[in-house]
Image (tube, helix red, strand yellow):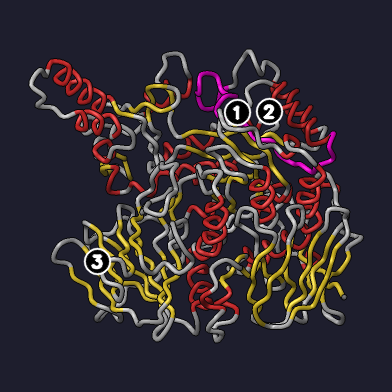
Amino acid sequence: MIRKYRYGAPFDTEAVTEKIETANGAFPYGKISLEKGFDFTYVMDEDDIVYGLGEANRGINKRGYCYISNCTDDPNHTEDKRSLYGAHNFIIVSGKTTFGLFFDYPSELTFDIGYTRMDTLKVTCADADLNVYVIEGESAYDIVKQFRHVIGRSYIPPKFAFGFGQSRWGYTTKEDFRKVAAGYRENHIPLDMIYMDIDYMDSYKDFTLNPENFPDFPDFVKEMKDQELRLIPIIDAGVKVESGYEVYEEGVEKRYFCQREDGSDFVAAVWPGDTHFPDFLNKDARKWFGDKYSFLISQGIEGFWNDMNEPAIFYSSEGMEEAKKLAGEFSQDKEGKIHIWKMQGELNGLANNPEDYRRFYHNVDGKKIRHDKVHNLFGYNMTRAAGEAFDRIDPEKRFLMFSRSSYIGMHRYGGIWMGDNKSWWSHILLNLKMLPSLNMCGFLYTGADLGGFGADATRDLVLRHMALGVFTPLMRNHSAIGTREQECYQFENVEDFRNVVNTRYRLVPYLYSEYMKAALNDDMYFKPLGFVYPDDKMAIRVEDQLILGNEIMIAPVYEQNARGRYVYLPEEMRFVKFLTDGSISEEILEKGVHYVEVALNEVPLFIRSGKCIPVAEAAECVKDIDTSKLTMLGYEGSSYTLYEDDGVHKEYDKAENYRKLEK
């Protein structure tokens, strides 16, 4: 059962698609105060677990820390960070009393979950203008499915998007991309996508191509496609201020950019230098910007990734003027009145300064709304602009789309990647823990930058991270300019990488099938063990193993120099390893704790008792996976219902899409 409680005059985020009438009477849980903004307080039981918050730091169980929903461009995902790129305000308190809460509020919202007091959950925001949804059900898992139903169907990508992708900030010329293609194809490592970061553009201008490097872009797109490789370009949120640049001039003429209070177009510096931000909350501007994707689609492009859409700001005109003024005073200061730390703080504070988010406005149905009041909706509506445009440009076709910043509701238009992580072992575990929380909030197509984006990767870290990435719907190796090159063919014993990626392609029929079932049935692709074994006191506390679909459990190795790991099995399971010679080892393990050995070049999984999964022969691209010749792994006498469609169109509900397979 879902009830909606309305406070003040909420902004319609369009996160919830079902009409839910406003409830009367007292709020059923905890205490709400409206004296100073909005304040919800609930005293937790000692054994309560708090699930949710989507893309948030720390664990699957969010107890013990403070989290702030405030879409933030921050590449240092350390334990102390309270905000990341997304704002996903859905939590479930599971224990003595179990209930879910969705705080539909588009600005900064704080979740103090046992941080100030270990027994107290406190949710606060500055303005008491929000809808709070209360979801009650038989279990935490049941509550998730109810919530997923009212926020709308999750985005469904084309099937090629379940292949492996290679990316690096720094691929600039056609030769760079050809080198990547050759590195994979000549080493027979499967690959379906090569990503284009900001360097493919002309001076970092959206919907342009560098004329020197890509004078005949459609021919180059075709050249890659002839090798079954798709180019996936990036689109940034800022439009360069430049006379003669069509997108800029149109946006200025039609008043489609975010404006200052005085009506002038707001200026912020990002990659191109001075930029304007399209007003994605203005439906006319959203349509205008979305239609621009046709520039690349008409040249053969079938997928995109949206970036810098928190929105990220390097500095604003106003912020730079203030910094220059202080610098001038500092340079003339002979008495030491201005401390060096103040000068340093001013410069460090230029990027993503909260003051800048108060300097510009959106036009929403003729009403002027200051950006900070709706900050968390910017990336969501940028991706919505693209998703709605795709339906106009080619309504029957699926396009690949994922974003960095998001809010619940964006899950209907695209997936997300987890942003600028690092080549740190801790980020493999953080990647794992985010997955079920994101699924709870509707984001099924997700994954992290495998091997890490920033810092220098090591061979063993890339292999271990990719062994987790085998199972994430978005499987992409991505790294930053200036870091160690980490494409699979850059390391010794390339056959080890070939086996890991081969394993992904052997599992694509199963992974795609489980993804589609989850999307079509408002379900989860990844689940915490506690959702499947709610009465198992040990299972509900496990944070480094997940249930994938309905048949398997994954337990990746995430520690340097480890030769294996301990796992907890809530029931008897079949331990499976995909070995580097192409063979598969299987072993029955009883319920309980086991130490399992997993070599660097092996991919482990566990098949649940009484179940089986389909496995294909390896192929070098998704198109070549032969689903007519599948091997069933698992328990004798079991069966599996395979979902399979053409992977391109949107005819999801055909009876022939389902096929029963026997072991």
Residue under the image location 35 percent in, 63 percent down: 65
Residue 523, horizontal then vertical, whole percent = 59, 69
Q: Which residues are magenta?
A: 186-208
Instruction: Tell me if residue 197 is in the magenta stretch.
Output: yes
- Residue under pointer 3: 7
Asked if 465 appears above or below 62 in the picture, the reply is above
Q: Is residue 60 left or right of residue 264?
A: right
The quadrant the N terminus occupies is: bottom left
Mark 2 belongs to which amino acid?
A: Gln
- Residue under pointer 2: 299
Residue 14, horizontal then vertical, whole percent = 41, 56
Mark 1 belongs to which amino acid?
A: Phe
Residue under the image location 40 percent in, 86 percent down: 96
Q: Is residue 246 left or right of residue 31?
A: right
> Is tag 3's residue or tag 2's residue first in the polypeptide sequence?
3
Q: Is residue 340 visible?
A: yes
